Image: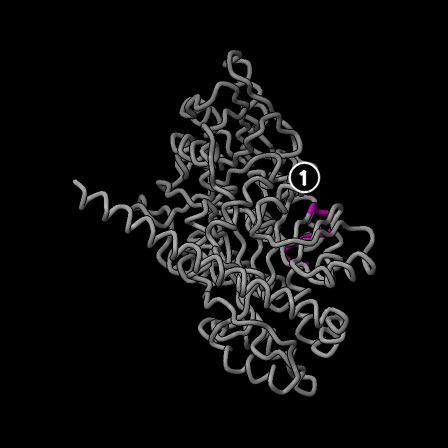
Amino acid sequence: MQDAQTNVAYRSSTESTAGRAARVRWSTRKGEIRAIADRYADDRDTWIERNRFYYEDDYRYMRFLIPEGQRVLELGCGTGRLLASLKPSYGVGIDISGEMVARAKKNHPDHTFLVGDVEDSSILSRVKGLFDFIVLSDTIGSLEDCETTLNSLHRFCTPDTRLVIAYYNRLWGPLVTLFEKLGQKMPQPGQNWLATDDIGGLLELADFEMIRREWRQLVPKPLFGIGRLLNRYVGTMPILRRTCLRNYVVARPVRNGPPRSLSATVVVPCRNERGNIEPLVQRLPAFCRDLEILFVEGHSKDDTLKEIHRVITKYPHLDIKVVQQDGNGKGDAVRKGFASARGEALMILDADLSVAPEDLPKFYKALVENKGDLINGSRLVYVMEKEAMRPLNFLGNRGFALLFSFLLNERVTDTLCGTKVLTKTHYRKIAAARDYFGDFDPFGDFDLLFGAAKANLKIVEVPIRYAARTYGETQISRFTHGWLLLRMVIFAFRKFKAL
């Protein structure tokens, strides 16, 4: 017994000694970081101007990720230049260097700046409120305990808060060291060795989910005017982009409470679908307590509108409504339906019944359990009914899905599946940012997919059973849709890659 007690005491003593040694190393490294930052604070903006090409591209992409007018917390803010460039409605910056913060306060008095170590909980406790975005630009390289620090950020998060981490590719380590020795880069103490996969693992440990990652800046110098062209059109290519200097990761918090209970509106665009109206109503499950069925009629020639009114009368216990389109096309119908919808969960179901109404509860469940922000159907998993999709269409959809996954930095296996589900709150975010894309999509699928990717929403897919229509004629043309997909690839490359 005495030997056991002696061993316990020995281990405790050893662990305490190790802990004290770790704290000494931590304190020493933090002291070095603070001392270097203080020493170069007066020249920090000069260093940025000296590398203007690099910083302009970095800030441009950060502004792409973070729209103006957001509540932004930046950890490791330096002189506040990045925070100010984001034009937040409320901006807070924290930095370990008192000299850096002094200049930030002087240069950007509209924002709040605090001196302190972002790994010190007493400093974070001085920050009040919740934020739309939390930014760590290169700061993760200086942290002693990344997991604990990331865990501590949940106090500032809503379910829609996005964490943006920017860091440099460690493959560039020798060149970065060379730039420092040549006086082309401000000196820094040793940095953590973290690839985007490592950052993703740390985020997962801290209850954050990585939504997207991107690699940018194949060359950080203008190279006599061709640097920007190389970065836009060469450095964004698959495989090669992994060699770029800058890495970006966007994540969302995933500490979920109990599933939400949301009212829902099923928006049904319909044109010449008279024979499908009543079967759709009969087959649609009552998957939530407050369910609205909203038909958006598109100037049919087969008495579809008359049939909808008949069904409304026949099923008075159901909340069925109808509105008529002002314009043409499914995209216009979806926007009309979403604008008129009463429910908080907005759901699209095509009237041709090629997607089974019985599958909608799966979409609703994924949404209310916070599995994703935009729930997209995928027709390309389960075996299809014959004549549901022609072989050439299937192969084309598969190929384009790979391209769009690369372009949007989120996995998308089926861009043209008509069934998509999201909350009204997230749809309003997409609609508010629609000016970035303009009126480009007659079908509505890309409006939602591109808008969700731009708004940093998590896209999750639900496999569905795809059936051949039993009434009416298809409104899909393989050549029209093929040309549309090709146009969308070029459009997405311009809007998401060649910034």
Judge whether 313 appears above or below 302 on screen.
Answer: above
- Residue lying farthest to the front in this orientation: 2
Judge whether 174 appears above or below 166 on screen.
Answer: below
| Residue range corresponding to the magenta coloring | 63-71
Q: Amino acid at mark 1?
A: Lys
In the image, 364 versus 327, the foreground residue is: 364
* Quadrant of residue 39 within the rendered picture: bottom right
Residue 285: say if magenta.
no
Judge whether 268 appears above or below 161 on screen.
Answer: above
Q: Residue at x 36, y 50 (%)?
A: 380
Where does the image place residue 328, in percent across and percent down from the top left? 65, 43
Quadrant the N terminus occupies: top left
Residue of label 1: 128
In the image, 110 versus 283, the foreground residue is: 110
Where does the image place residue 272, in percent across and percent down from the top left? 54, 35
Quadrant the C terminus occupies: bottom right
Left or right placement of residue 81 versus residue 169 in this view: right
Left or right placement of residue 235 versus residue 394 in this view: right
